[in-house]
Image (tube, coloured by chain):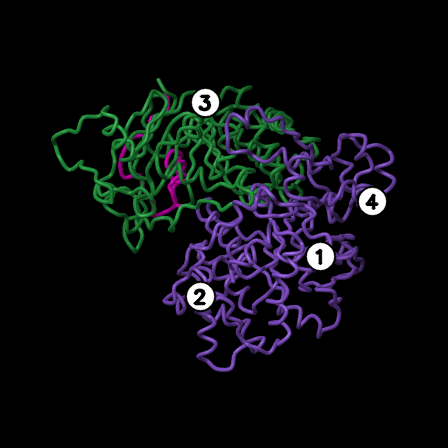
Amino acid sequence: MALLEVKNLKTSFFTDAGEVKAVNDVSFSLDSGKVLGIVGESGSGKSVTAYSIMQILAGTGKIVGGSIKFDGQELVGAGEKVMKNIRGNKISIIFQDPMTSLNPTYTIGRQLMEAILLHTNRNRKQAYERAVEMLRLVNVNEPKKRMKQYPYEFSGGMRQRVMIAMALACEPDILIADEPTTALDVTIQAQILELMGSLQKELGMAIIMITHDLGVVAQICDEVIVMYAGSICEQGTADEIFYNPCHEYTKGLMRSIPTADTAGTKLQPITGTPIDLLNMPKGCPFAPRCDNAMKVCLTKRADRMQLNDDHAASCWMNVKKGIDSGEIEIETKGGDEDGKE
Amino acid sequence: MAKNKKPHNKAAKPESKAENKPPVKKSDEAQAAKPVNKPDSNTPKPEAAPKAKKAAASVRKPEASDNNKPLIEVRDLKEYFNINVGMFRSKPLKAVDGVSFTINRGETLGLVGESGCGKTTVGRTLLHLYKPTGGEIIYDGKPVKTRDDIKKYRRKATMVFQDPYSSLNPRMTVSDIIGEPLDVHKLYSSKGDRMERILELMSYVGLNSEHAARYAHEFSGGQRQRIGIARSLAVNPEFIVCDEPVSALDVSIQAQVINMFDELQERLGLTYLFIAHDLLVVRHISDRIAVMYLGRMVELADAGEIYDRPLHPYSKSLLSAVPVPDPKIARANQRIVLTGDIPSPLNAPSGCPFRTRCKYATEKCAEAMPEFKEVSKGHFVACHRTGEIN
């Protein structure tokens, strides 16, 4: 059984302008010891998916459907008491901005010990020792001295280490990292990614890595989910996603990144702007920006299609390919005709 | 016009550059009073601009413009900020400490480094947004020193800022934002003239005329950055400092904006100083790349050269740290992970600033500052041990 199983998760924000379906029918599962990457541009719902799992949505946000099962236990509608035991203890989260996620008025030590005291049966002395041990684990020099310091005395990379130490202090089964390196320099990013990779192997936990940087995904993820406008458009192993992308959006993303080979040439950007979640089109959400959009794309969303054991995508192009090669027989229930626009 | 201009920026030989470029720009500059320079009303829209660089890329030459006069020459630029360290004492923070480089016409110089290394300060000091503590800025052969110089200089050199959310005034409409530089420099004869120019600038960056009356908050990040770029183009500049112009944008939008920078360069013959921390972006857009560390330049070379053969240990680790969007390469990639953080510029190490994080550091590195010298044609590096470690 998978450690975490998310099924048909729907999360909406109820704003004055209407319901914003930030996460719309997202399903995935995560096995222990794996690294799952969730990529997508801002507003694609990747962070909201994470916040839904932790149930730390902002005021107007609400899970409106679906189920989240952790180790067989249903979390949707489980109540605060259960969630308090899960958060920090079983599932931890690291936020994007290490500059603002720490309380500037408390020492690092106090903040680290808070989590340990809250979730374990350790006494203050044991908690202190555990905190020092955690700082040492994340390669903070002179941990005892650092325990007495305040966040302003730490650099960005160091603060992110403290956040990781805090998240790992209770040995969670799942670590959710929400853009953990976006605010950091590449050299520091490399340090942090390396650290997360080695800790993951050492402690055998699962990581959900939320990022918009495909480079980061390539580096540490086993499996990848690509999100667009609140839904998953493609899902598969890292190799499948990078070497055999099967959704037009993923293909566009891959084409638009500058690499050593693109120097001096034009990039091939995805045209248009990200979609307004308040005015979702009827068909595929990516269709308005898609170069290969067909008639059917504008009227009907493609179902998720399992392409092979490690790969699934929701794109009509795959259906078309299947029909063209004769692998798929056109069903009679109609509406699936796909003439090119 | 776009046709005969396009080759010069990336690959053209010096001769063709010399004959192609200056007449166009210089004659315009000579009659500085001319309010609006409409060089190409009949050129294609940015989307349709010819893809010249693709072909040009392979023949790009590092020494392409050696015998050409540089547009910008910076000599030993210094920028110190006074920081209070006690009640009555202050200490200079050497944000930029003795940086020298040149940028040729039509060229893009990329400037990379970690945060706090002084790359933004270089850009701002270069435009005299900060008064330089020391050193010289020579633009088109003439030093920029007096107030008059600076005023004239600001008509030729502009800036695109990093954050498209905070660099646009929320209380001004798009047309006022773009028109402000025109007002400041009095670059129009009538209101209709002004509006015409604004609409022209908006079309350069792919904005519709109906956007003119809207406010910045009505636009997405990518569109706001387009507004910022249109504003920087208003005075018809020759040189633009781009300070992390795409780092706040999503990948798909980033590519659109990068292409636009490319197209504008081809079309208007612009020269860029492109500051960024995303090395893949810098690699894509730059002809030459300079690496900074703690207020100093540690390496400067042709873009391809610095990626294939970085000489300074800092450049090596910086480049190896770039996450490559390719799982197989990423897994095989041996990263040179630096230990520790960049030291505070208030307590910079003696000698070579990088020595505290450098695995090759010796006593000599602690004693003397390495000289920034040319080791092969067009490849400058500041390291005592360049010869030994490579």
Residue bearing mark 3: A34
Q: Chain of mark 1?
A: B
Separation of disc 3 and disc 4 at Cα?
Answer: 48 Å
Other residues around mark 4 within 10 Å, as few (<14) / some (14–19) / many (≥20): few
Mark 4 vs 2: CB contact within 8 A: no
Residue bearing mark 4: B371
Amino acid type, callout 2: Asn
Q: Residue at 55% x, 19% y: name it.
A: A202
Image coordinates for residue B11, horizontal then vertical, percent: 61, 49
Image side of residue B76 versus residue A165, left or right: right
Tell me, yes or no, if residue B20 can be seen here: yes
Chain A painted colour:
green
The region drawn magenta spans: A43-71
Tell me, yes or no, if residue A103 can be seen here: no
Image coordinates for residue A236, horizontal then vertical, percent: 38, 27
Image coordinates for residue B59, horizontal then vertical, percent: 60, 43
Q: Are marks 4 and 2 on the same chain?
A: yes
Give the vertical position of B73 relative to B382 (above or below). Answer: below
Residue bearing mark 1: B68
Mark 3 vs 4: CB contact within 8 A: no
Q: Which chain is purple?
A: B
What label does residue B335 carry, if any?
Answer: none
Q: Chain of mark 4?
A: B
